[in-house]
Structures are given as C-alpha cells and as structure tokens.
Image (cartoon, grey):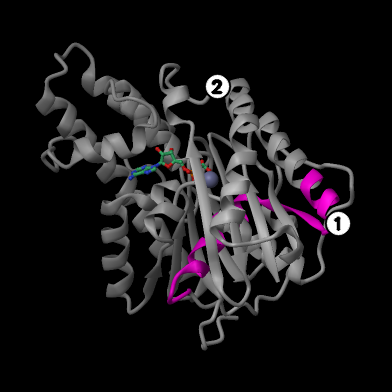
Amino acid sequence: MRVLAIESSCDESAAAVLDERLGLLAHELYSQVELHRAYGGVVPELASRDHVRRLLPLVRQALERSGTAPGQLGGVAFTAGPGLIGALLTGAALARSLAYAWQVPAVGVHHLEGHLLAPLLEAAPPPFPHVALLVSGGHTQLIEVAGIGRYRILGDTRDDAAGEAFDKTAKLLGLPYPGGPELARLAQSGTPGVFQFPRPMLDRPGLELSFSGLKTAVLHSLRGRELTPKLRADVARGVEEAIVGTLVAKAVRALEASGLDILVVSGGVSANQRLRAALTEAVGRRGGRVYYPRIEFCTDNAAMIAVAGLARLAAGEHDGLAIQSRAQWPLETLAAVPWRCEFGRSEDVS
Ligand code: KG4
Ligand code: ZN
C-alpha cells in the first residue's frame, strides 16, 4: 500500500508519500516560522490561512517527486488532532476531499502518535515494547509503548511542556520565536553552573513533570541586571541544563519503573543535541539504548503522519465522509493495530 499524508496541526504545512515496501518516497514541508515571528508566537488565524495557500502545491510536489499517480494510492492520511482547530480543519478538508475524488479511504491520524512512530522511518527502528519520551511544544509525556496504538501514559507535565519552557525563557532573553533552537545555540557559549535553576519534581517519587517554575526563576535572575551577552549565554546554559537534567532523570526513572531498557525520544525538543547526548549517555550506562528520529523528523512533518496513517489504513481503519478534527484527543483512546511494514528492510520490526 502507498499513502499520501498531510500535516497542518500548527505552523508547518507538509505532505509526504510513503510506500509499505519502498519506504518514504517524498516529503515536502513549508515552515511558517517567518510569518509568525513578528508576533512572537503562532497566530492561529494566520496559520490556517497560510495552510490553505501552501498545502495543495505541497501535495502536488510530493506526488510528482515520488512518481505517484493518484491511482497508486491506497489512502490519504491527515493530522486530525490535537492541535489548532482551524489549522487542523484545512488539512482535514483537503485530505478528505482528495480521498473522495480519488475514491480511496481517508484516515485521521493522532499528531502525537505520528511523533511516537517517526523513528520507524530510520534504518534501525526501535523494537516494541519501549518507553517513549515525547517532548514537543505542547506536550511532555513519558509513555509505555507496547505496540502501535498501545500506549500507557506513565508521566505528564503538570503545567508547561518542555518546548514551551524553552520558548518562554528564550522570549525573556530577547530571542526570536521559536525560542528552543535559538536558546540551544546561545547556550553553547554559556558557562555551565553559573546559574542553577530549579529541577522541579526530582526530589519527589513519581514520573510527573513541571516546568512553569523555570520561567519565574529566570525572570528573578535577570531582574535589575544589564542583559549582557555573557549573562544571556550563562542563563541560556542554565535553562538548558535544568530542562535536560530533569528530562534525563525522569526518563531513566520511567525505564526503571517499567522494567524496560529501550527509550525512544521524539517531538521537537528531541532535536536538542545536549538532550540527545545526555540521554544516550545515561541510558547507555544502564545497558539500555536510545532511538531518535532523524533531526528533520523531530519537529512537525508529514512523514511521521504517513507512518501512523499507513499502519491504520493497512489495518482497515478509515474515517467516514464527515470531517472530524479534534483540538484535544487523549492518546490512550486509540485502537491497537499491527505493524508489518519493512520498507524494503529484511528484519521484522513488529
Ligand atoms: O513537535 P514540534 O515541532 O511541534 C509541536 O507539536 O509542538 O515541537 C516544537 C517545539 C518548540 O517548542 C521548539 O522550541 C522546540 O520544539 N525545539 C527545540 C529545539 N528544536 C525545536 N527545543 C530545544 N532545542 C532544540 N534544538
Ligand atoms: Zn508536533
């Protein structure tokens, strides 16, 4: 089976074509970052309007680059939620209409399931079961993943997501949106240990997380001081170390609690190099192994939506003609489906 996938949950418009035997044949992406930068964050209405402009050309490009005629498609997958509802509806309406015109099934995909399954596109995909650390702009969760659609939330953030903590503190340092990668760049020239920001919830048992205190701590440390390049870099380094330290400690704790030794890290923040290095080291020390998506599939993209969509379409799942998008959608309500796609690889990844 070959599928077309469309992603439009936030500020990235994307389309991809995935074949169950040949693997990923095309993935196209347009980032709206420049559009939203002047406002310091994503403006939902502008995001929706831009998706409408970008998506269809991206779809045509993905079909052309992959040499795919509509008749070769077994279905169309789209991000149905969670996300900005207007933005989601643009992709859903397009995907549903194309599927209707081409007389193939359409399936709405859970955006976070897409992030969780992105590492399946790599040459050495992670085996199930594993623990996933999902760290994006809107979510920070530790999840026990027994298979596709078999998710058990082990820990969640009580307030801000890790990406949100990066973005909010970056804003305080005067960095442009999106702050995460900018803050990580600035932190490289900072001195470790100058600022020791709180690592909340580490002194307590359990797998809950909290990042809202970090912003306040940064605000206090900047108050009344001149924002010199050295101060900014040292604060950025302190912020990155606090977030990375907290995530590593909780991820290791989740492996211990579940008795598993495979960790999968995905979502936008998994692009952070210091986080990747620290997790690889900490999990390796326990004799475990960490898997990541390639950097371009850490942040939002349509390739990951194609993986989840292909698994669900191949299992016979599909939506009706009524278009359903959901701003909120609990991951644990998804149905379990098997995964047999090898993408031309000989090993069995299920
Ligand atoms: O998964 P994603 O693209 O969108 C959501 O589904 O939320 O994640 C975006 C988040 C943003 O908060 C962004 O600042 C953060 O991922 N991010 C990073 C890095 N690259 C992206 N945070 C820290 N370091 C990075 N290198
Ligand atoms: Zn995302």
The image quarter containing residue 128 is bottom right
> What element does badge 1 sit on?
loop
| Residue occupied by mark 1 | 103
Specify the quadrant that holds the C terminus. Answer: bottom right
Q: Residue furthest right?
A: 321
Instruction: Say few, some or many: other residues with alpha carbon within 10 Å of mark 1 (under 14 / 14 to 19 / 20 or more).
Output: some
Position above or below: 176 against 326: above
Amino acid type, label 1: Gln
- The image shows residue 334 at horizontal and vertical percentages of 74, 59
The residue at 60%/59% (across/down) is: 17
The tag earlier along the polypeptide, 2 or 1, is 2
Per the image, label 2 sits on a secondary structure element best described as loop
For the residue pair 113 and 330, the one nearer the viewer reads as: 113
For label 2, the residue is 43
- Is residue 152 visible in this depiction of the protein? no
User: Which quadrant of the structure image shows residue 200?
Assistant: top left
Numbered disc in front, either 2 or 1:
1
Q: Which residues are magenta?
A: 97-125
State how far apart marks 2 and 1 are (Cα).
Answer: 35 Å
Check mark 2 vs ligand 1: CB closer than 8 Å? yes or no: no
Q: Is residue 14 above or below residue 222?
A: below
